[in-house]
C-alpha cells in the first residue's frame, strides 16, 4: 500500500512566515535538490531521503542508543556515528530521549501535507498569503508537489513554488507553469563558475525563467550574495539586465551570505566548504541593491 | 489628522520622566493619617469611618508641585512612592522592613528613620482589625492549609489589596462636577429614610458627601499651593502656568470641566484619590480617548489648544500615573513581581453603538505613549473589524517600538464573554480591560480577580491519591491508586473530582474574604463614582448582582495539565508503550533512571502547536472548571468565573509541584501567562500557537486569559512585514482569540541587559501581563523570559 502512495520527504514546515511570498504563509520544505551549491545553508535538504542528525551537545549519555545499532558508539562527548555505514534508518533517533540523535526529514503523503497546510487558511485569506513549497527543490518531487499544489489551489489556497529553475521532468515544468507565484533563485551569470558552484549549467535556468516570464507568471527573484562567487558587479549587472528583460518580476530579494548553516553540516557529518568566508558589509549590500533598484523593480534585502 | 505625525518630548517632560525612573521610596503618610482617623472614629459606622479617613489623608498629606509640571497631584509624598495599606495587612510591613530594600525583586530604597518610627507607632493598631487578621480567624482549616500551597494571592486580603480593579464613571464626573453629585446626594438625604434599603443608602450618601468634599478640598490645596508658588515665581512664563494651575484646581473636579486641560486635571485628581482610598493593581482610567474627545475636539476647533500642547499634557498624565510603585509582601510579590501598577488605558474597538471608536485623540494618546513608555500606564488595544488597518498597524508599530508593551484584545471574543456573564450588548461594547486581562464594563461593573489556583498541583493530587508528591501530605480527596487506573477516563474522573473539591474550597475562601471586606473596608469614593452604587446605596464591596459583578479564579498551569494528560493518553492508553505504574514510579523519582519514558513524554504532543489532540484537552479542563464555578454564588450575588492567568506565580507554584507527565522536572516553573504554551514548547510557528489558543472556548474563561508570545524584532523590520504582522493579529482576533501580547526583544538584548543593568534601566519587558523594568526582576524571571520561544524568520 505504501508504495502506491504519493509521498515526499519533508524536512520542515514553517507556519506564520512573513517571507517566501505575499502575505502570511506556510512554507513546506521538501528534501532533495538537483543542485549542490557550495554555500547551501540547508544541507539537510540536498538528499531526498531522511538523514540522521547528530548533536552531541544534547546527549545525556543515557546509553539507550548504544544497543540499537553497531555503527554507533558512545563516547564521553556523546554519540559517534560511522557515516560510511549508517543507513539513516532512524532507529537510534527513535530511542534517543533528547534531540542528540534526530532525523532530518519525515515522509509525508500528499494528504497529510495538505491537512497540515490547510490549517492556516483563515490566515492566508485575511493576509493575502498562502502556501510556499520549497526545499531543496520543490519540483524534484514532481508528482508530490504537483498533486499537493493542485489540491491546495482547488481549496482556494494561493501556492508559490520556490525553485532553482532547473526542472528535470516535464511535470516539474508544469508545476512552475501552473503555480500562482514563483520564487526564482539566480546564482550567478558566468556559465563556468555556475557549473563549479552549483553543479549545473545556468543557460537552462535562464531559459526556464524566460519561458515563465513569457507565460506572464508573477515572479520574485532571489539572489544569494556569496562573496567571491556571485557578488561581482559584472555578474550583478548582467543579472539585473536579465531580470528586467523578463517583464513579470514583481520583486527582487537579495540574500546576503550568512553562516547559520554551518552547524547543520556538523550535525550531518558533512564538510563545510565556505569556512572563513566573510559576510558582506552593509554598505556593499546597499551598493548592490542600487544596481537592482535601477531596474525599477522593488528590491529588498532579505526574504 | 495625520496619524504618522510624531511629537518630540519637551525638555521638561524628559526631566519629569527621568524623575520617576527611580527606585521607589516608602511613604508613611497614608498609613499615618488613616490610622489616626480610625483611632478617633471608633464606634461609628464603618462606611462613615472610611470616608472620614480618606478625608483626613487628603486634607493632610503633603502637596507638592514639581518644576515644569502642568498637571498636579500625587499618590504619595515621594516621586515614585510606595504607600502602606494597613487596613488589609499590617504585620508584614514591620517584619519585612529591612528585607524590602534587599530582597531579590521589587526592592525599595532603605526605609528612613522617620518612616520606621511611624510604622512602628501606627501599624500595630491594626492587629486583629485588618481584614487579613480577621479572615484568618474565619477561615476553616482546609482553607488555611491550601493558602500558599495551592492558592496564591487567592483573596484580596492575602494579596494585601483592595478592590480597586475598576474604571469608575469618569465621564459622569467630568460633565457634572462633584458639586452637582454632592447636591443630588444632599437632596436625597433630606428625605426621611424608612426601609432598610433607604436606611443603608442614607448612610452611604453621607459617606459619599464626605468623600467627595475631601477630593474638592484636596484640589483646593493644590490651587492654593500653585497660587503661593506663583507669587514667588520670577519667571513670567512659569508664573502664568502656576496661576493657570491654581485657576483649574480651584474649579475642577468640583465643577464640570470645560477644556481638555481642565478635564485631564480633573480626572487625575480623582484618580489619585481613588488610589489612596482603595488601591489594587488595576485602578484604571477607562477609555480616555472616548470621554475626553468632546473636550479635545472643541478646544482644537476653537484654537484653545494645539495638538503638540495636548500631547505634552497627555505625556504628563502618563508620567503621573507612574508615581506609585506598590510594595507587596514577599509572599505576594512572588506572584506579581515587577511592581505591577496596571493603570490601564483602553483604546480602539467600537463605541456603545457599535461604530469605530478610534478618533484623532486616540492617535495622540499613542504618540504620547510612544515617548513616555514607562511601566505603570498599560495600553490595551481593542481590535475590532470596524477598526481600520491603519490603526491596527499603528498600534503594532507602537508595540514593536516599545518592545511589546501593548495588550491586544479581540473585541468579538470579549463582547461575547461579557454577554455570557450577563452584561447588555451596549455595556459589553463599552468594555475596558483591567489588571492583567480582565474585561469589564467601564463605570458599570466590577470584575475582579480572586487570585490563582495551581492546576498542576490538582493534577498531581489526581495522580497521587490526593497527596502532594513533595510533602506526602494528604491535601486532596482520595481518588484511588493511580497505578490501577485502567483507562484514561478513570484518570479524567479522578482529576474532575479533585477540581470540584479544590474549587469548592476556593469559593469558600473567597466568599469568606468578601464578607470580611464588606464589613471592614467599604470604599465610599469609588461607590460615589459608580452610578449603580450611588443609586442603590450599595458599596462596591457589596454590589454584586446589581453590577453584574464577577470574580475570577485564575487557573495556573493548565497547559502543563493538558500536555501531561495528552502524553499519558497517547503513550500509556493509546500506544501502550508504558504503564501507569512505570509513570508514577518515574514521577516519584523525578525521572531519574527513566530516560526512555522521560524522552517519550517530552516528545508527546504539546499545547501551542495547533494539535487538536492536546488542544482539546486544554479546552475540556477549562470548560469543566468553569462549569463547576457556575454552581456557586458569590457575596451579594456576584458570579464566580474562571480565568487563566499566572502573573509571575508560575515560579512559586511550580516549586510546589513534583515531576509532571509532560516531562517537566520537579519544582520547575509552570507554563507562563495562563494559556501561553509551556516555555519553549511551541515550535510550530506563530500561527500554530495562535490557533491553539484561539480554538479554546473563551466564554469558559470569561475572567480573561493571558497569551504571551515573543517575536524577534527582525521579523517585522519592514513596512510590508509589519502589515503582515498586523493582519495576522487581526486574524487571531477574528477567529476566536482573546488576548495576546508580545515581547519584541532578541535574546541578545536581554542577556546584555542582565550583564549591564545600569545601561538598561528603562528596558521594559512583558512579565505575565504587565510591563516591568527588566532590571528590577529577579534572575529567575529574567531567565524565564530569555527561554521563551522566539518566532523569527530565517
Ligand atoms: S540511523 Fe540507523 S543506521 Fe544510522 S546510526 Fe542510527 S540506527 Fe544506526
Ligand atoms: S540515546 Fe541520545 S541521549 Fe542517550 S546516549 Fe544516545 S545520543 Fe545520548
Image (tube, rainbow, N blue to C red):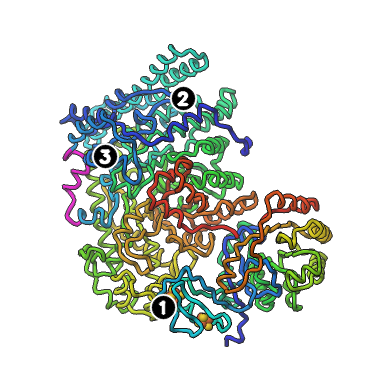
Picture coordinates of residue A105, whole percent (x, y)? 57, 74
Badge 2: residue crowd in 10 Å (few <14, some 14–19, many ≥20): some
Q: Residue at x 34, y 34 (%)?
A: B25
Picture coordinates of residue B776, whole percent (x, y)? 40, 44
Residue B725 is marked as none
Q: Is residue B661 visible?
A: yes
Tag 1 residue: A63
Mark 1 residue CB less than 8 A from any atom of ligand 2: yes
Magenta residues, start to end: B127-142
Picture coordinates of residue A301, whole percent (x, y)? 68, 54
Badge 3: residue crowd in 10 Å (few <14, some 14–19, many ≥20): few
Q: Residue at x 56, y 38 (%)?
A: B363
Picture coordinates of residue A148, whole percent (x, y)? 64, 74
Q: Secondary structure at mark 1?
A: loop
Q: Residue at x 30, y 29 (%)?
A: B208
Nearer the viewer's eye, disc 3 or disc 2?
Answer: 3
Q: Secondary structure at mark 3?
A: loop
Q: Cα distance, mark 2 to mark 1?
A: 69 Å
Tag 2 residue: B69
Callouts 2 and 1 on one subunit? no
Image position of B751 (left or right of A179): left
Mark 2 residue CB less than 8 A from any atom of ligand 2: no
Q: Cα distance, mark 3 to mark 2?
A: 34 Å
> Decide: marks 1, 3 in contact (CB < 8 A)?
no
Residue B98 is marked as 3
Q: Residue at x 48, y 30 (%)?
A: B316
Amino acid at each position: 500500500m505504501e508504495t502506491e502512495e504519493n509521498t515526499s520527504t519533508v524536512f520542515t514546515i514553517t507556519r506564520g512566515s512573513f517571507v517566501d511570498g505575499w502575505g502570511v504563509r506556510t512554507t513546506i520544505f521538501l528534501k532533495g535538490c538537483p543542485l549542490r551549491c557550495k554555500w547551501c545553508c540547508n544541507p539537510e535538504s540536498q538528499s531526498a531521503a531522511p538523514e540522521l542528525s547528530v548533536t552531541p551537545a544534547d546527549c545525556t549519555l543515557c546509553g539507550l542508543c548504544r544497543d540499537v545499532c553497531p555503527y554507533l558508539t558512545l563516547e564521553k562527548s556523546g554519540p559517534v556515528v560511522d557515516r560510511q555505514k549508517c543507513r539513516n534508518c532512524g532507529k537510534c533517533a527513535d530511542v534517543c530521549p533528547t534531540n542528540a540523535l534526530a532525523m532530518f526529514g519525515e515522509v509525508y503523503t500528499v494528504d497529510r501535507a495538505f491537512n497540515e497546510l490547510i490549517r492556516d487558511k483563515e490566515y492566508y485569506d485575511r493576509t493575502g498569503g498562502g502556501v510556499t513549497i520549497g526545499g531543496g527543490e520543490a519540483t524534484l518531487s514532481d508528482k508530490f508537489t504537483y498533486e499537493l499544489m493542485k489540491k491546495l489551489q482547488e481549496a482556494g489556497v494561493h501556492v508559490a513554488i520556490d525553485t532553482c529553475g532547473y526542472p528535470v521532468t516535464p511535470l516539474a515544468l508544469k508545476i512552475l507553469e501552473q503555480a500562482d507565484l514563483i520564487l526564482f533563485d539566480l546564482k550567478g551569470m558566468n556559465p563556468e563558475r555556475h557549473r563549479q558552484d552549483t553543479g549545473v549549467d545556468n543557460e537552462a535556468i535562464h531559459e526556464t525563467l524566460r519561458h515563465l516570464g513569457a507565460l506572464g507568471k508573477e515572479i520574485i527573484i532571489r539572489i544569494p550574495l556569496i562573496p567571491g562567487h556571485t557578488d561581482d558587479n559584472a555578474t550583478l549587472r548582467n543579472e539585473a539586465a536579465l531580470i528586467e528583460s523578463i517583464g513579470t518580476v514583481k520583486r527582487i530579494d537579495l540574500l546576503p551570505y550568512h553562516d547559520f548553516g554551518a552547524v547543520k553540516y556538523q550535525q550531518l557529518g558533512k564538510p563545510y566548504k565556505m569556512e572563513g568566508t566573510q559576510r558582506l558589509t552593509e554598505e556593499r549590500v546597499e551598493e548592490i541593491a542600487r544596481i537592482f533598484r535601477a531596474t525599477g523593480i522593488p528590491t529588498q534585502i532579505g526574504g | 489628522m495625520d496619524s504618522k505625525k510624531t511629537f518630540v518630548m519637551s525638555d521638561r517632560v524628559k526631566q519629569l520622566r527621568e524623575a520617576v525612573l527611580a527606585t521607589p521610596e516608602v511613604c508613611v503618610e497614608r498609613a499615618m493619617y488613616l490610622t489616626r482617623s480610625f483611632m478617633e472614629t471608633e464606634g461609628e459606622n464603618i462606611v462613615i469611618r472610611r470616608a472620614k479617613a480618606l478625608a483626613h489623608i487628603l486634607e493632610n498629606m503633603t502637596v507638592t508641585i514639581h518644576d515644569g509640571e502642568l498637571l498636579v497631584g500625587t499618590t504619595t509624598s515621594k516621586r515614585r512612592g510606595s504607600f502602606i495599606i494597613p487596613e488589609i495587612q499590617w504585620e508584614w510591613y514591620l517584619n519585612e522592613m529591612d528585607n524590602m530594600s534587599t530582597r531579590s525583586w521589587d526592592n525599595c530604597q532603605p526605609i528612613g528613620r522617620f518612616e520606621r518610627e511611624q510604622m512602628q507607632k501606627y501599624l500595630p493598631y491594626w492587629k486583629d482589625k485588618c481584614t487579613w487578621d480577621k479572615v484568618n480567624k474565619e477561615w476553616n482549616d482546609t482553607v488555611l492549609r491550601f493558602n500558599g500551597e495551592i492558592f496564591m494571592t487567592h483573596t484580596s486580603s492575602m494579596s494585601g489589596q483592595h478592590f480597586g480593579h475598576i474604571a469608575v464613571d469618569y465621564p459622569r464626573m467630568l460633565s457634572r462636577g462633584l458639586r452637582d453629585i454632592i447636591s443630588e446626594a444632599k437632596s436625597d438625604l433630606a428625605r426621611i429614610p424608612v426601609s432598610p434599603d433607604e436606611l443603608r443608602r442614607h448612610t452611604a450618601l453621607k459617606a459619599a458627601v464626605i468623600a467627595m468634599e475631601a477630593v474638592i478640598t484636596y484640589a483646593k490645596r493644590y490651587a492654593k499651593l500653585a497660587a503661593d508658588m506663583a507669587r514667588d515665581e520670577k519667571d513670567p512664563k512659569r508664573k502664568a502656568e502656576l496661576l493657570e494651575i491654581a485657576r483649574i484646581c480651584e474649579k475642577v473636579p468640583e465643577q464640570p470641566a470645560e477644556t481638555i486641560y481642565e478635564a485631564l486635571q480633573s480626572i487625575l485628581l480623582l484618580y489619585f484619590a481613588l488610589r489612596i482610598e482603595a488601591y489594587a493593581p488595576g485602578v484604571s482610567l477607562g477609555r480616555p480617548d472616548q470621554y475626553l474627545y468632546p473636550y479635545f475636539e472643541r478646544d482644537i476647533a476653537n484654537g484653545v489648544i494645539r495638538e503638540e500642547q495636548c500631547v505634552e499634557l497627555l505625556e504628563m498624565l502618563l508620567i503621573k500615573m507612574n508615581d506609585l510603585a506598590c510594595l507587596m509582601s514577599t509572599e505576594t510579590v512572588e506572584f506579581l513581581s515587577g511592581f505591577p501598577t496596571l493603570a490601564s488605558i483602553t483604546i480602539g474597538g467600537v463605541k456603545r453603538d457599535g461604530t469605530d471608536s478610534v478618533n484623532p485623540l486616540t492617535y495622540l494618546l499613542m504618540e504620547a505613549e510612544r515617548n513616555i513608555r514607562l511601566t505603570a500606564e498599560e495600553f490595551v488595544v481593542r481590535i475590532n473589524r470596524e477598526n481600520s488597518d491603519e490603526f491596527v498597524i499603528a498600534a503594532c508599530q507602537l508595540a514593536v517600538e516599545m518592545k511589546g508593551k501593548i495588550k491586544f484584545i479581540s473585541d468579538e471574543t470579549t463582547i461575547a464573554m461579557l454577554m455570557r456573564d450577563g452584561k447588555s450588548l451596549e455595556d459589553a461594547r463599552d468594555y475596558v480591560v483591567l489588571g492583567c486581562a480582565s474585561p469589564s464594563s467601564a463605570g458599570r461593573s466590577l470584575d475582579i480577580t480572586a487570585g490563582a489556583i495551581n492546576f498542576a498541583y490538582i493534577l498531581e493530587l489526581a495522580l497521587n491519591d490526593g497527596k502532594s508528591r513533595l510533602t506526602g501530605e494528604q491535601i486532596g480527596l482520595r481518588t484511588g491508586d493511580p497505578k490501577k487506573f485502567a483507562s484514561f477516563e478513570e484518570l479524567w474522573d479522578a482529576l474532575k473530582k479533585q477540581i470540584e473539591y479544590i474549587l469548592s474550597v476556593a469559593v469558600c475562601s473567597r466568599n469568606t474574604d468578601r464578607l470580611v471586606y464588606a464589613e471592614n473596608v467599604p470604599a465610599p469614593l469609588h461607590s460615589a463614582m459608580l452610578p449603580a452604587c450611588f443609586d442603590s446605596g450599595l458599596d462596591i464591596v457589596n454590589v454584586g448582582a446589581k453590577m453584574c459583578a464577577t470574580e475570577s479564579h485564575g487557573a495556573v498551569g493548565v497547559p502543563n495539565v493538558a500536555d501531561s494528560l495528552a502524553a499519558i493518553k497517547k503513550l500509556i492508553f493509546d500506544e501502550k508503550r508504558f504503564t501507569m505504574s512505570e509513570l508514577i514510579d518515574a514521577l516519584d523519582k523525578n525521572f531519574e533512571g527513566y530516560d526512555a519514558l522521560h524522552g517519550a513524554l517530552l516528545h508527546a504532543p504539546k499545547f501551542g502547536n495547533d494539535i487538536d489532540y492536546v488542544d482539546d484537552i486544554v479546552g475540556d479542563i477549562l470548560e469543566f472548571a468553569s462549569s463547576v464555578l457556575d454552581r456557586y454564588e458569590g457575596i451579594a450575588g456576584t458570579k464566580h468565573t474562571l480565568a487563566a492567568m499566572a502573573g509571575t506565580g508560575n515560579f512559586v507554584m511550580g516549586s510546589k509541584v513534583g515531576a509532571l507527565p509532560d516531562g517537566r522536572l520537579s519544582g520547575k516553573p509552570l507554563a507562563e501567562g495562563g494559556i501561553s504554551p509551556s516555555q519553549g514548547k511551541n515550535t510550530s510557528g506563530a500561527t500554530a500557537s495562535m490557533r491553539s489558543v484561539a480554538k479554546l472556548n473563551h466564554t469558559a474563561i470569561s475572567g480573561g486569559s493571558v497569551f504571551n508570545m515573543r517575536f524577534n524584532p527582525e521579523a517585522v523590520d519592514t513596512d510590508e512585514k509589519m502589515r503582515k504582522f498586523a493582519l495576522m493579529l487581526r486574524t487571531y482576533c477574528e477567529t476566536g482569540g482573546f488576548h495576546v501580547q508580545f515581547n519584541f526583544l532578541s535574546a541578545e538584548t536581554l542577556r546584555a541587559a542582565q550583564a549591564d543593568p545600569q545601561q538598561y534601566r528603562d528596558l521594559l519587558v512583558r512579565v505575565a501581563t504587565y510591563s516591568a523594568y527588566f532590571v528590577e526582576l529577579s534572575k529567575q524571571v529574567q531567565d524565564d523570559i530569555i527561554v521563551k520561544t522566539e518566532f523569527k524568520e530565517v
